[in-house]
Amino acid sequence: MEKDILNNNLKYVIVPINNKDIVSIQYKFLFGFNNEFKGINNFTHLLEHLMAFYFNYKQCTVKKIKNLLYKKNFKSNAFTSQNNMTIWIDCYHKDVNFFLNLLSRTLYKLCITQKNLDMSKQNVINELKLNEDLELYNGINKYVYKRNKVDFSEGVKDVSKCNLQMINDFYKNIMSSDMIIGIACNKKNINYNKKLIIKYFSKKFTTNKNKYPAKLKIHYLTKNTIFKIYKPIKSVKINIVIPLDILFYSKEYWELKIALNYLFNFNRGPFYAKLRNEKKIIYSINYNFEFNKDSSKTLLIIKTGCEKEDLNKFFKLFYNIFNKIKISNKDFLLMKKNLIFSTKYNYMNNIGDCLGFNMGNYLYNINISYKQSINNLEKAQCNKDIVKKIKKNKHFIFLLNKDYKKI
């Protein structure tokens, strides 16, 4: 892997892959929803929409952009997460020069007209109103991170009143955050793509001093706490949020992930066996991690749902299983083999996953290579202490239902 920092502090990573034709390009800003607060809620999201169109000083309208890209074969999109905003392009190697040039023009000379801004604002507002998980993240912001005025309604308000001056000022601040560009390409083309990166991305950015740092501070509970949040649905959505302190890709991380894969496995897991197959009070139950740059702010989020009349029964059964977790060595080994396969498969067969892994490690200073990560996974053992650690952590319970009043 080739990696370095340009004179303007832009990091770059070039990852060798076997594919001779296809190239993956990603550009990341280390700035996401967690950096936002009252007045700039969803401004990163708004900027993402403007960049995803590749508006630039040469092509400053949707029509011009579409005419430019119409004959190219590629895939492209952008997304904003809690920690970063990413633009990605998958294309043929013969078109790398074209797309890096276009991306560079967009970044250095983003063309924000009133028409482009109005269109992007409406798209973001519509997306916010259609998102079904906003209530959960509103609750996490308010009760876990103690961030007031960072929610759906404030996001709609802030985006609605955003003007050209505000978004341009915000953009200049974004450009002073950590940034990284990554390319996954055939090893024969590494030097060629390195020269293109230097050619198009060594320019000095016009920035303001970054005044939007993330200010997350987890509120640690002394007892498990339930928050009832309004959502216009008949059933009850249940989200159990457990703060963890765990290093990404470490041996302990993989041991935890294997244990969770067993607990929430559809075929053999105890939660499905008891809550769905036997008692028939849930349809599905799963988990995901919400990672932050600071590992102590990682959240384990368990998601499920049931009918309102089954809620008490659900919690009684859930905690009965949760507090008596036991994983046999046979089940642990089976889950481990499945995880090794899926991890290697995704890394080797998905260029974007391969590139994203290496860029994330570099950007977040995670000094664990893919090889080390796999070694940690292969060394993982059935760790009873890691299961006890989950059970000991006090956690937040968010219940979403139309009959609950807002807190």
Image: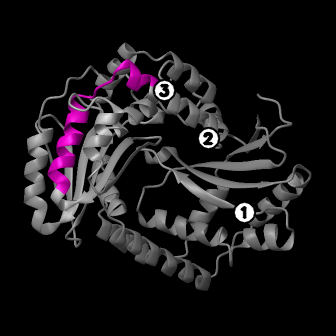
View extreme (right): residue: 309
x, y (%) of residue 384? 60, 70
In primary-sequence order, the first of circles 3 and 1 is 3
Give the mark toward the camera: 1 or 2: 2
x, y (%) of residue 109? 22, 28
View extreme (bottom): residue: 330
The amino acid at mark 3 is Lys
Q: Dot 1 corresponds to which residue?
A: 284
Which of the 4 image quarters holds residue 407? top right
Marker disc for residue 121: 3
* Secondary structure found at label 2: loop
User: Which residue range is magenta in the image?
Assistant: 95-118
Q: CA distance from mark 2 to mark 3?
A: 15 Å
Which of the 4 image quarters holds residue 80? top left
* Secondary structure found at label 1: loop
Q: Dot 2 corresponds to which residue?
A: 131
Residue 242 visible, this orientation: yes
